[in-house]
Image (cartoon, coloured by chain):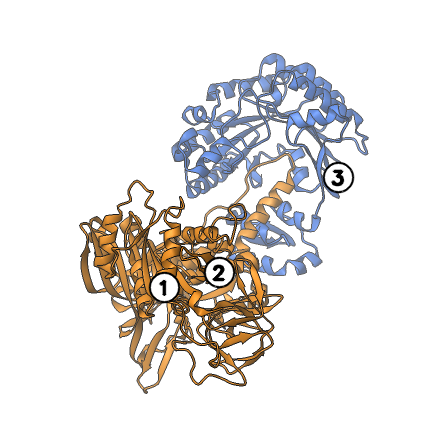
Amino acid sequence: MDSAFIRNFSIIAHIDHGKSTLADRLLEATGALSQREMMEQVLDSMDLERERGITIKAHAVRLNYRASDGETYQLNLIDTPGHVDFSYEVSRSLQACEGALLVVDASQGVEAQTLANAYLALHHDLEIIPVINKIDLPAADPERIRAQIEQVVGLDASDAILVSAKQGVGVQDVLEAVVHLVPPPKGSPESPLRALVFDSWFDPYRGVITLLRVVDGTLRTGQKIRLWSNGKSFEVEGLGYQSPKAIPAEQLSAGEVGYMFANIKTVSDAQIGDTVTDDAKPAAQPLPGFEQIKPMVFAGLYPVESHEHGVLREALEKLRLNDSAFSFEPESSAALGFGFRCGFLGLLHLEIVQERLEREFQIDLITTAPGVRYRVVLRDGDVMEVDSPTKFPDPAKIDKIEEPIIEATVITREEFLGEILKLLDEKRGVQKKFEHIGSDRVLLAYEIPLNEVVLDFYDRLKSASRGYASLDYHLAGYRESPMVKLDVLVAGEPVDALSIIVHKDFAHERGKALIERLRKLIPRQMFEVALQAAIGNKVVARENIPAIRKNVIAKCYGGDITRKRKLLEKQKEGKRRMKRVGRVEIPQEAFLAVLRVGGNQT
Amino acid sequence: MAGVYVSYPFCDQKCTYCNFASGVPSAGLESEYINAVTAEIAAHRWQWSPETVYFGGGTPSRASIRQLNRLLDAIPGRPWKEATIEVAPGTVTPGNAQAWKGAGITRASLGVQSFVSRELVRTGRKHTSETVARDVEQLREAGIDHINIDLIAGLPFQNEASWRESLHWVGRLEVGHVSVYMLEVDAGSRLGLEILKGGARYGARDIPDDDCIASFYQEAVEYLHRIGLRRYEISNFARPGFESCHNLKYWRLEPYIGFGADAHSFDGKTRRRNVESAGEYVDRFRRGMDPCASETPAELAEERFFVGLRLEEGIRPAAPELVRFADPIRRFLEDGLLVMEGGLLRLTNRGVLLSNEVFQEFLT
């Protein structure tokens, strides 16, 4: 197809500003799906995505649109993940486009993700078309939002399109704007092949399926291709595009977007951001911007039933076929037995993996408190990367510790500012920007240790702002911090899975809060149990769980022995689900207690 | 020798702490039920002549003398070594008591629960301590002198002083047998459900905590011992010779057969349970169906421990059992929850209160 009639674009928005609904309308308006066929929010296809209302994987749908100029255009709508954990994937999706629709809610206005996504799009030189959505809502104030987009994002919003995706208002205007404002792709079908992988997933029948944007040259079935980053070559078995059903095609040429399968066995062989080129006549340069995605958040995953260790390993291997962004390596804990230290892009990513393991593989899991990867410089000059408290070196050998820092953008209403500033301060944040937006809102930029964010930041921010604060962040480097390892001793025995790495100044307070929480979570045992929090040999907090005094069935049941047995079996089953450390039975929730000890929450 | 249990699952009102399948009968149900149970007993082919009979409930003492006679007449073996009727305080009259005696009843078990009005009122009970004293007197006059009093530790508003008052009443009445139960908190009773939900009805927020209940129990053990009633099972205390022969069969794994709704049977190999509700029981009878709802093979190797160890006399483990359970036995001996003397294994005082912890380890 002549690339003059191709338009590649994305929709970017803050969560719940109506991205998916608008996408559905565009599909409907171009006849890609009849209304009857239309399931709500077609593009969010994974169950989890639907439930959470967040797009986790990218998708690309080809729409054929007959514009008012009488020409028929091929519009490729590339959907992007909608969460900060997946910002690298968003950036690759945007790289596959020439334009983006920036959707802003007509009453809520610019939020943190609006800003982050808009900057990302500007960074990729995309033509950004502001769209003000939900104009049907009673609280809609498009003029105020138009001004806000100009002031906060710095875009000319005078031609912003007013839309109600829900009612189908303005959809035609959006399609016309895409045709007339988004530039056609450059690139020549005759140049050596270069195609950008912007998503890949594992299909049990076809192997890995990749979504590609052909930048230069032409991709054909049967062609021998090569992945740039690893040099591996494969033969193209099938090509096509989503409309949104998969339609096979013989070739994809410069400017076009589609899918490819080439008997690739694992997604880590076709990573997002990689360049596909011809094996015989490779291009001179890869496409820019490829990075190995690095996990930022780490947690131990342990099977509740220790014999399920092998099952968990298989499940993790299977999940990794489909998700090269998480990592895992064997780890063992004296308290929890054999498990895996897993790395994730962020907390949502962790939750997704955890839920898929429990849902798709029916494995009961204990997840230890998430942490980050520290850079520890030892006195002898060696540098260690520490992603687990158990690997924390002897403090006597440590010269300095650096922790990952993020730059967070928070947009909120003025009335919640006090609480939020207090929270950011408590989270060791350093203010970088304080800016009023419009009459009653404030934009804050802060540098915060990632460690503080993974603890309980989202929940606290949400409650501090009653939901009226939006957050976006990106990694901003490392900063030296006096971190220490806080151990928990139960009945005198250290429980490695309960150790955390904390800032020295917070160790005492966190230790105390943690012990108090554990006292409530660990049931009384047949003997008194001492709980201690300690840094090295120094005990910073202590509590006792008194011994249980009675656990007895004192009742006569006309010979109902079966009932007695059932009661005993139920108790026994309850214990079996706990982890035994020394002689103390510790329930699973205790291992997550560490999560909830930040600040003054109970 | 075996025992017979007959279930009468009807009451004048449902007590707040009660988690049995019993309640106030609808019109007509009661007489149909008696017909059905009589028929179930009559149809039974006796392999042995029963030694004990237990007429339990519910409130069997509210059954008419005619109904009682119909049921008991169907059971062979009269005069039985022991025949117990469960009695709600206030349902004894001189006429009743004599009729019971005449029907072969030798023992009465009074569901007193408490002698303290403040506690009784909240549970839905209407009697007073005087009612109980009069009942005991009338039973004795009729010649029924094996008398048990049930007490519950853990009722709303109970405290150390009120618990002692109930215990002292038992001493004053000089009954030969006392059962001390502890309030069970589960969704089966209104009070239990309210406690689980965190509500305030039925005095749910005024129940003593577990540690208090443990102290109440401990006090009962000591007090009853002082007045000559020794513990022979976790919740049963008797003057020597006044133990319940029927209940002992449960704990010694001897056979018994139950008739009526929610009645349980054990023939030495299999445990059976009849359908729980009186309505369904009657319905099955009408359709000519077996009232048995479930049948499971007994697991005697384990039951010997978690049932037999309830008895103060303990059990005498055989060599293979000592091997099979070597681990928990050693651990509990070390912890002082079990004691072994002359080949007899039994719970210690502390072991009784933590007996569930012990018993669990004998389930495999």
Q: Nearer the viewer, residue A230 or A550?
A: A230
Q: Which numbered disc flags the more N-terminal residue, 2 or 1?
A: 2
User: Marks 1 and 2: in contact by CB < 8 Å?
Assistant: no
Q: Which of A35 and A265 is in front in this view?
A: A35
Question: Callout 2: few (<14), some (14-19), or many (20+) C-alpha neighbours within 10 Å?
Answer: many
Residue at figure coordinates x 57%, y 48% from the top left: A570
User: Marks 3 and 2: in contact by CB < 8 Å?
Assistant: no
Which chain wears blue? B
Q: Are marks 1 and 3 on the same chain?
A: no
Mark 3 element type: loop
Q: Are marks 2 and 1 on the same chain?
A: yes
Question: What color is chain A drawn in?
Answer: orange
Q: Name the residue under label 1.
A: A182
Q: In this view, does A255 lie above or below A36?
A: below
Q: Position of residue A546 (x, y in %)?
A: 40, 52
Mark 2 element type: strand
Residue A20 appears in the rendering: yes
Question: Callout 1: few (<14), some (14-19), or many (20+) C-alpha neighbours within 10 Å?
Answer: many
* Number of callouts: 3
Distance CA(mark 2)–CA(mark 1): 17 Å
Q: Name the residue under label 3.
A: B267
Q: Name the residue under label 2.
A: A61
Label 3 lies in what chain? B
Q: Which residue lies furthest to the top in this view?
A: B95
Q: Which mark is residue A453?
A: none
